[in-house]
Image (cartoon, rainbow, N blue to C red):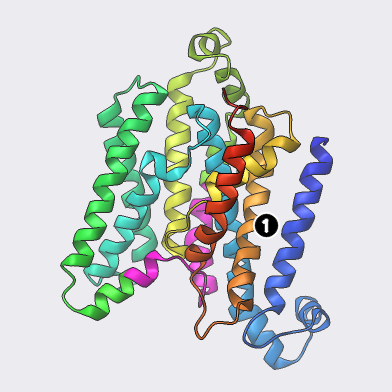
Amino acid sequence: MSRPILLSSLAALAFAAAILSLGVGAVPLSPARVLAVLAGGGDETARIIVLQLRVPRAILGLAVGAMLGLSGAALQGYLRNPLAEPSVLGASNGAALGAVAALYFGIAAVHPAALPLLAVAGALLALLLLVMLAGRDASALSLILAGIAVGTAAGAGIALALNLSPNPFAAMEITIWLMGSLEDRSLQHVALAVPCIAAGLVLLGWDARGLDALTLGEDAARSMGVDLKRLRMRLLVGTALGVGGAVAVSGAIGFVGLIVPHLVRPLTDRSPSAVLWPSAIGGAALLTLADVAVRLLPTTSELRLGVVTALLGVPVFLWLLRRERGAWS
């Protein structure tokens, strides 16, 4: 499939998912009522529901999904590992630990910006530990091993916070947040998260051609003029900033960064640069559609988004692994 057709098709899917997200919920709204509100009209009830509740949720679904999809594609290209995603480098767990610390110590109640700031700080701290463990001139394998160590340490910190929670309500709040959700988000959450996500998207998309050169090996990439140190630093900082901002507002959502690049790769020439932006748009569409699904499923309380992505992700990933296990050999 040609690149313009692929990008336009995925963009249309993401747009349709966003419009669907604005109409679906406890109070269903027809497309006509939604479009009337977006055009500046509509009745008062529809305006409140759409503008104050569902527009922020749709924006965050698109932004978080794009960040997770692009970061997964970039890390798979850089590490030359089809199983790579943000959690491989410990960024997701580091961001989650920072957010859990904000909840555990009550800092999140002091100011709305505290949670995303600590989530980004946790992701950046994980990045710092990663560089310290792997070294400045780390190979892809060293980064993966150091990332596993950092992610495990952050996971242990989260478990410790749950174990030492002063009361069951605090533990429940942390547990529910870790499940991942976009419910009850506002434009304030959008303002806090989107700048971090936008910076992450720019940094990760900066070195598309460098990722292509890396498919020939690090020595070949150097001979082609690629500065591997700067590429690695932009990749790591972009992942930390973007994933930190995403995790801060959505909680822990898995499998999007792992699966989306695999879904779009067969539609491209399989080069890392060709997979990056389709993965971003595809991730935006997938997460928004998953968020629509949690509102449509007939349950007594709304399912958590992270639970749904995991339930969808595991069988899809196993199918992809079986189908394409020879593509990376």
Q: Residue 150: which quarter of the image?
A: top left
Q: Quadrant of the N terminus?
A: top right
Location of residue 158 in the rendering, given as x and y in whole percent from the top left corner: 26, 58
Residue sitting at the far bottom: 44
Name above or below for residue 224 compared with residue 294.
Answer: above
Residue positioned 64% across, 73% down in the render: 55
Location of residue 170 in the rendering, given as x and y in whole percent from the top left corner: 25, 76
Name above or below for residue 149 compared with residue 307.
Answer: above
Instruction: Decide which of 113, 214 is in the foreground and name it.
Output: 214
Residue 190 among magenta residues? yes
Q: Quadrant of the C terminus?
A: top right
Residue sitting at the far front: 322
Residue sitting at the far top: 223
Q: In the image, 89: left or right of 192?
A: left
Residue positioned 35% across, 43% down in the render: 90
Name above or below for residue 300 compared with residue 165.
Answer: below
Name above or below for residue 155 compared with residue 102.
Answer: above
Q: Residue 179: which quarter of the image?
A: bottom left
Residue 257 among magenta residues? no
Q: Main secondary structure of the magenta part?
A: helix
Q: Which residue type carries mark 1?
A: Ala
Residue positioned 58% across, 10% down in the render: 224
Residue 327 appears in the figure: yes
SS under mark 1:
helix
Q: Dot 1 corresponds to which residue?
A: 285
Count every numbered label the image shows and give the total.
Answer: 1
Residue 125 appears in the figure: no
Which class describes the residues within 10 Å of circle 1: few (<14), some (14-19), or many (20+)?
many
Instruction: Decide which of 86, 324 is in the foreground and name it.
Output: 324
Residue span colored magenta? 175-199
